[in-house]
Image (tube, helix red, strand yellow):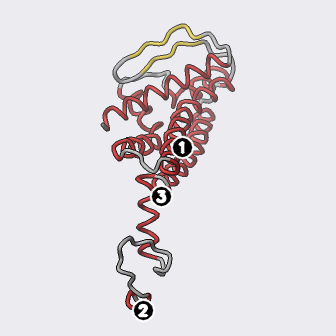
Amino acid sequence: MIVLVFWFRMFVHYVGQYFILKAMDAPVSSLEIDWYRLHLSYDIWNVTMEMFVIAFGPLSNSVIFLFFGAVCYLSNQYIYCFPVLFCKFIAWYGLLNIMDFIFIVVVDAAFMKEDGDAWKLYSYYEKTQKSGEVGLFVTILIQFGILIFNCYIFYNYIVFIHCDARIKDIYLRISGLGKGYYIPEDNEVSWNYLM
């Protein structure tokens, strides 16, 4: 399941970049699918376009993760069930979503792709202003902001939604006073006896 989630995350990353390029009417000349990455060939117009391409890879995974989390939450609220296997799938997807940019950089570096996400802005600034460090800094800044956002939504999913909020329930049982517990068939033990 982890391998499937890993590949699905990569696929959504590059398809999100493809859709943002199409939304900006950028000329995409080819989209090649390999087992380890999708390769987009397109013409660069300006730095804003490159920033959107870099940001929308991880953000497309975030949108899909939010959709999966919403489906799980609504299922638990209105039909009172959601398969545990799918909850685990969503949890793994959220964890890999946090590390999405790191995986993309590792794959691009391993296969020596100079047009990888980490080096797009570096190459752009190197060609236009002879100073690629600015592009590298902007890339790190964009990805750090997306990382914080992904950590936030993953935390909320794991604590409040995953497996019908099991983590929240465990936390309440450990740290709570005990008066708010719902314990079915508890033989009506008194508060003093519980203390």
Label drawn at residue 70: 1
Q: Residue at x 50, y 21 (%)?
A: 115
SS class of the residue under badge 1? helix
- Mark 1 residue type: Ala
Residue 21 picture location, percent across and down: 61, 19
Instruction: Give the Cα separation between the discs numbered 3 and 2.
Output: 30 Å
Q: Point out the residue furthest to the bottom here.
A: 192
Q: Quadrant of the C terminus?
A: bottom left
Give the residue type that dot 2 points to: Asn
| Dot label at residue 159 | 3
Question: So how many labels did they put on this image?
Answer: 3
Which residue position holds label 2?
A: 192
Q: Residue at x 63, y 28 (%)?
A: 52
Left or right: where 22 falls relative to 11: right
Q: Earlier in the sequence, mark 3 or mark 2?
A: 3
Mark closer to the observer (3, 1): 1
